[in-house]
């Protein structure tokens, strides 16, 4: 079964890590970005199923 991909775009590292930890426990593949520019690059490269801002 293919894991769903989620991209978290958030400037606060603590929030990214908390959300990523919980999503990974539920089986999501998590990508992280701390800036909008970095987030746009990851969207183009990885095509996530969902994006959290």
Image (spheres, grey):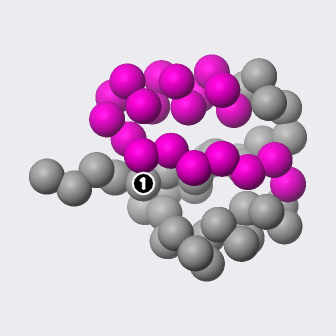
- The residue singled out by tag 1 in the image is 5
Q: Is residue 26 above or below residue 48?
A: above
Measuring from the top left, give residue 26's x and y in whole percent.
33, 28
Q: Position of residue 10 (x, y in %)?
A: 78, 42
Left or right: 52 in relation to 27: right
Coordinates of residue 18 in the picture (x, y in percent): 63, 21
Residue 29 painted magenta? yes
* Residue 9 higher or lower than 15, as above or below: below
Residue at position x 77%, y 22% in the image: 14
Which of 14/53 is in front? 14
Q: Residue drawn 43% across and 61% down?
A: 49
Whole-percent x, y for residue 37 in the image: 84, 67
The residue range painted magenta reads 16-35
18 left or right, relative to 11: left
Would you call the spot at circle 1 few (<14 residues within 10 Å), some (14-19), or many (20 or more)? some
- Give the residue drawn at x 45%, y 31%: 23
Q: Which image quarter: residue 27?
A: top left
Total number of numbered labels? Answer: 1
Along the horizontal axis of the image, is 22 left or right of 38?
A: left
Residue at 86% of width from left, 40% of height from top?
11
Q: Say what secondary structure mark 1 lies in.
A: strand
């Amino acid at each position: 079964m293919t894991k769903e991909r989620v991209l978290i775009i958030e400037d606060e590292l603590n929030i990214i890590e908390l959300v990523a930890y919980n999503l990974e426990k539920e089986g999501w593949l998590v990508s992280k970005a701390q800036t909008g520019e970095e987030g746009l690059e990851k969207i183009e490269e990885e095509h996530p199923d969902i994006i959290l801002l």
